[in-house]
Image (cartoon, rainbow, N blue to C red):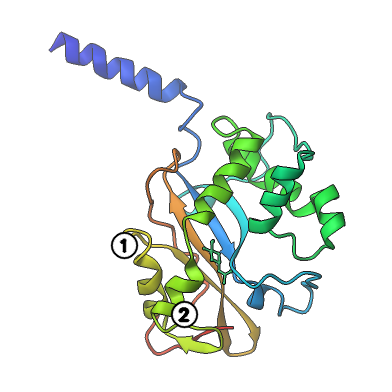
Amino acid sequence: MVKSRIISVFFIFLFSFSPVYGNFEYLQLVLTWPASFCFRPKNICKRPAKNFTIHGLWPEITGFRLEFCTGSPKYETFKDNNIVDYLERHWVQMKFDENYAKYHQPLWSYEYRKHGMCCSKIYNQKAYFLLATRLKEKFDLLTTLRTHGITPGTKHTFGDIQKAIKTVTNQVDPDLKCVEHIKGVQELNEIGICFNPAADNFYPCHHSYTCDETDSKMILFR
Ligand SMILES: *[C@@H]1O[C@H](CO)[C@@H](O)[C@H](O)[C@H]1NC(C)=O
């Protein structure tokens, strides 16, 4: 009895002082569908990708996104060409020429400043970027969608798209994100997949409710 009380006090102590898992609940890996992203007039894509590409990895608490956290080291430009090339394959900075993108790293530094610094207590900058790419590499969403009959240019219900994605998330809810580039036409713009802080398990994503989730609305996969 006394022993278990000591143990629980110990755990409460650990939990309240732990800077590690205390400040965010899960990580959302956000993957962009380039055909939709680049269709938006103001997103001038110099290098539109043909496959899903990383938008970001976002530390969140249900319904709340941690952003612009202070107190951790600022973004340091990656100099190692192997890392830069590897990142550029999975986390394409589509709005920029290749040389400019690799040298200035505008998207990566922005995403790190806005989101990455909020989980820097467990993932330093390099770990954060390698985690995002490692997680992304686990999915071939284009093939997953295709095997469910969801191919570019076709329309489907929210339920059908969600069902297809859930086959690769252990049935855990993703967050589908829609935009309306053309009035009245909802299209799938991004797919969020969530993980526990250690990123070794799926975690249900909070829905952004940007897509009409009813069966009466068809969503375009551009
Ligand atoms: C798309 O990316 C995934 C990895 O994220 C990869 O397995 C797949 O081969 C790629 N598909 C094409 C057509 O490039």
Q: Type of residue at label 2? A: Asp
Q: Residue at x 67, y 73 (%)?
A: 37
| Residue at the extreme left | 1
Give left or right: position of 174 versus 137.
Answer: left
Q: Residue tagged by mark 1?
A: 171
Could you say whether the residue bearing mark 1 is in a helix, strand or loop? loop
Give left or right: position of 84 versus 27.
Answer: right
Q: Residue tagged by mark 2?
A: 212
Residue 195: mark: none
Q: Residue at x 79, y 50 (%)?
A: 105
Residue 58 in view in this figure: no
In the rendered image, residue 69, in percent from the top left (x then y), is placed at: 65, 38
In the rendered image, residue 92, in percent from the top left (x then y), is placed at: 70, 60
Q: Type of residue at label 1? A: Gln
Q: Residue at x 72, y 30 (%)?
A: 73
Residue 187 in view in this figure: yes
